[in-house]
Image: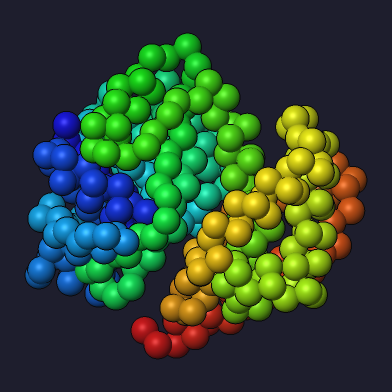
Amino acid sequence: MNIGVAGAGAVGCYFGGRLSEAGHEVTFLARGEHLHAMSQQGLVIQEEERQFLVDGIFTGNVAALGDVDLVLFCVKSNDTKEMAQQLKAVIKERTLVMTMQNGVDNEEILNDVFGADRVLSAVTYIQAAVDEPGKVSQQGRVKLVLGALDPSTDFASAVVSLMQEAGVDTVQSKNIRVRKWNKLLWNATFNPLSAISGARVGEILDDDQLRKTAETICREVIDVAIHKGILVEPEATVSHIFSRAEMARQHRTSMLQDRLRGKRMEVEAMCGYITKQGALLGVQIPALQSIYSVLNFVNDQQNKTSVLKT
């Protein structure tokens, strides 16, 4: 199969790399030093027990994805609408688009641009990072849960098989929106707090004050989810989220990675959406609201700094 990766960061590079290793033609859409390094020497993926080199097609031109059969849509949520519109202009009418992004509202944008009969959504369970331009590292367990936005379509099973044949633990969900919400609960609990504190997941768990703050945020987000009609059992969910966190102690969250690199963080996807839904539903979420306000300021400052450097 001919596959495109729109947004070749850590997640896109890892899954695109596995598909390339399995024999598929993969085109990676990237930019900057990361693109330059991959174009010169290929993509190096470092897993816990092995390293492999991906010799794919590396480009900064979205038109290079024009003939792909499947797009792994991995851009930051801030760029979803712009990238979707660019892809719409170049890809084939029946090309499938699978979002592997954080948050729960990217699907709505992709649905509007491409139509629900072409869009898949995937929940990614992976600890990955771009260690340096052209090199991605991955630790711990990797799993994908994916499903079609339109449950009446039957193409999700083919993509499940594609990923399984590439050695990726993949299952299909008939209610992918709920699975995305479940991941958002974890992300909203740890991503913003790690970005504002500079702490890894394990450091949040071990520090009494940070852990209490994380638990408060978790319960706030659960309250919003319940008011949105998502079936959540509060105490069991809190326990599950913190149990999963124990398995990711060394993980630097994606928001923390972005902040350390001076890149714009996914503040809206990780906590802005919840904050706004809380306001609409009349749910009080003071802890997350405070962190959201600070991170918005940090984002603006980092954006001003990057503009001054260019």
Instruction: Name the image quarter holding residue 51.
Output: bottom left
Residue positioned 50% across, 25% down in the render: 173
Residue positioned 81% across, 41% down in the render: 234
Left or right: residue 69 versus residue 130 is left
- Taking depth in this image into account, of 148 and 53 the one nearest to the observer is 53
Vertical position of residue 152 compared to residue 63: above or below? above
Residue reaching furthest front?
49
Vertical position of residue 94 compared to residue 218: above or below? above
- Taking depth in this image into account, of 23 and 280 the one nearest to the observer is 23
Estimate the x, y position of residue 94 in percent, counting from the top left: 28, 23
Whether residue 268 is visible here, answered yes or no, is: no
State which quarter of the image contains the N terminus. top left
State which quarter of the image contains the C terminus. bottom left
Estimate the x, y position of residue 190 in percent, counting from the top left: 64, 62
Left or right: residue 111 versus residue 282 is left
Left or right: residue 91 versus residue 310 is left
Estimate the x, y position of residue 92 in percent, counting from the top left: 24, 30
Instruction: Name the image quarter holding residue 4.
Output: top left
Residue positioned 63% across, 32% down in the render: 178
Residue reaching furthest top?
152
Residue positioned 38% across, 23% down in the render: 156
Left or right: residue 100 versus residue 230 is left
Q: How is the image coloured?
A: rainbow
- State how many labels appear: 0
Whether residue 306 is visible here, answered yes or no, is: yes
Estimate the x, y position of residue 24 in percent, counting from the top left: 14, 38
- Taking depth in this image into account, of 40 and 268 the one nearest to the observer is 40
